[in-house]
């Protein structure tokens, strides 16, 4: 079951319940005009560049290439998103923490997609049979073997071809969700919803068959 | 056998109610700040822990934000 985000909770620490003075100053300057707003945007972009640079280089490891472009694109896209969603900031964290998450998301998604750029993503809905094949090795206990076999059967019986494709790509082939979403012309949220629904079906089928976890 | 158990966990996912990816991103900043401050972040944002268990991409984003906040 997918649940909604609670906007507040009885145990929310007081320090997280309202914008702190530094966050209020950021908002005031970004909502200002002229040089004040331009200055704030410039400072914010520098912070986003620092976060994106750290993240892109950490994820790229020793890989070379045009990482500077990736860093700048991440910071630029994050800045656009932040300015568009400024009214969504509720002051439940520091403004800079809220802003950093956009830069780190952009950097992470772009770096993962770059790493998979030349790699094929096999969308094979029938590859689930590899799961059943795993359920027959000598070092498995009987319970694990039986459960894997039951999962393979449940995949065959209850999932749609699209649900099988997503389940196999993410759980067996370790394809990053953002990469899979790009190849499918979808979004991370929509792909994860497909995975979530597939898992729910599998758990229900296993429970109906008497397979507890 | 450990690999098989991990695979089973990935295939079946968390059974508890969980946030969507959009809900996770919306709450990620306050969740991570609360975690780093030693507060009960999972009580503050119900459904976040289950989602992070089930979604490797959002888990990655949580780790990245936490690591960045620790060095800034």
Image (cartoon, rainbow, N blue to C red):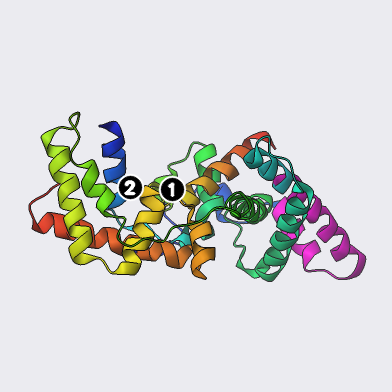
Subunit that carries the residue with mark 2: B
Picture residue at 44% right of the left edge, 68% below the top: A190
Q: Which mark is residue A174?
A: 1
**Which is the main secondary structure of the residues drawn in magenta?**
helix
Residue pointed to by mark 2: B10
Picture quadrant of residue A118:
bottom right
Nearer to us in this view, A175 or A73: A175
Residue A69 spot, x, y in % from top left: 78, 53
Picture residue at 68% right of the left edge, 63% below the top: A82
Picture residue at 12% right of the left edge, 38% below the top: A143
Neighbor class of circle 2 (other Cα within 10 Å; few <14, some 14-19, many 20+) is some
Most extreme residue toward the top, as rendered? A139
Q: Secondary structure at mark 2?
A: helix
Nearer to us in this view, A33 or A179: A179
Picture quadrant of residue A201:
bottom left
Most extreme residue toward the right, as rendered? A35
**A141 magenta-colored:** no
- Mark 2 and mark 1: Cα distance apart in space: 10 Å
**In the rendered image, the vertical position of residue B32 relative to residue A195, given as above or below:** above
* Horizontal arrangement in the rendering, residue A127 relative to residue A174 (left or right): left
**In the rendered image, the vertical position of residue A119 relative to residue A28, given as above or below:** above
Of tags 2 and 1, the one toward the viewer is: 1
Q: Secondary structure at mark 1?
A: loop
Residue B53 spot, x, y in % from top left: 38, 47
**A38 magenta-colored:** yes
Residue B55 spot, x, y in % from top left: 42, 52
What's drawn in magenta, residue-wise? Answer: A22-51
Picture quadrant of residue B7:
top left
């Amino acid at each position: 079951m997918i649940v909604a985000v609670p906007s507040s909770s009885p145990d929310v620490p007081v320090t997280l319940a309202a914008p702190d003075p530094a966050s209020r100053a950021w908002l005031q300057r970004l909502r200002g005009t002229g040089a004040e707003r331009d200055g704030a945007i410039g400072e914010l972009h520098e912070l986003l560049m620092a976060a994106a640079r750290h993240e892109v280089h950490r994820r790229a490891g020793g890989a070379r290439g045009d990482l500077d472009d990736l860093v700048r694109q991440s910071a630029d896209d994050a800045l656009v998103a932040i300015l568009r969603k400024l009214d969504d900031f509720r002051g439940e964290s520091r403004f800079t923490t809220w802003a950093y998450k956009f830069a780190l998301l952009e950097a992470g998604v772009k770096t993962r997609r770059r790493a998979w750029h030349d790699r094929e993503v096999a969308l094979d809905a029938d590859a689930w049979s590899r799961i059943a094949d795993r359920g027959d090795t000598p070092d498995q206990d009987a319970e694990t073997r039986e459960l894997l076999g039951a999962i393979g059967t449940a995949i065959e019986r209850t999932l749609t071809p699209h649900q099988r494709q997503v389940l196999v790509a993410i759980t067996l082939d370790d394809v990053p969700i953002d990469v899979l979403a790009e190849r499918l012309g979808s979004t991370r949220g929509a792909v994860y919803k497909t995975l979530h629904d597939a898992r729910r079906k599998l758990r229900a089928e296993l429970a109906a068959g008497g397979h507890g976890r | 056998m450990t690999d098989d158990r991990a695979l089973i966990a990935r295939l079946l996912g968390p059974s508890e109610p969980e946030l969507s990816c959009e809900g996770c991103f919306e709450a990620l900043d306050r969740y991570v700040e609360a975690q780093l401050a030693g507060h009960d972040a999972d009580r503050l944002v119900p459904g976040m822990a289950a989602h992070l268990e089930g979604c490797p991409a959002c888990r990655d984003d949580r780790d990245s934000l936490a690591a960045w906040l620790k060095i800034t």
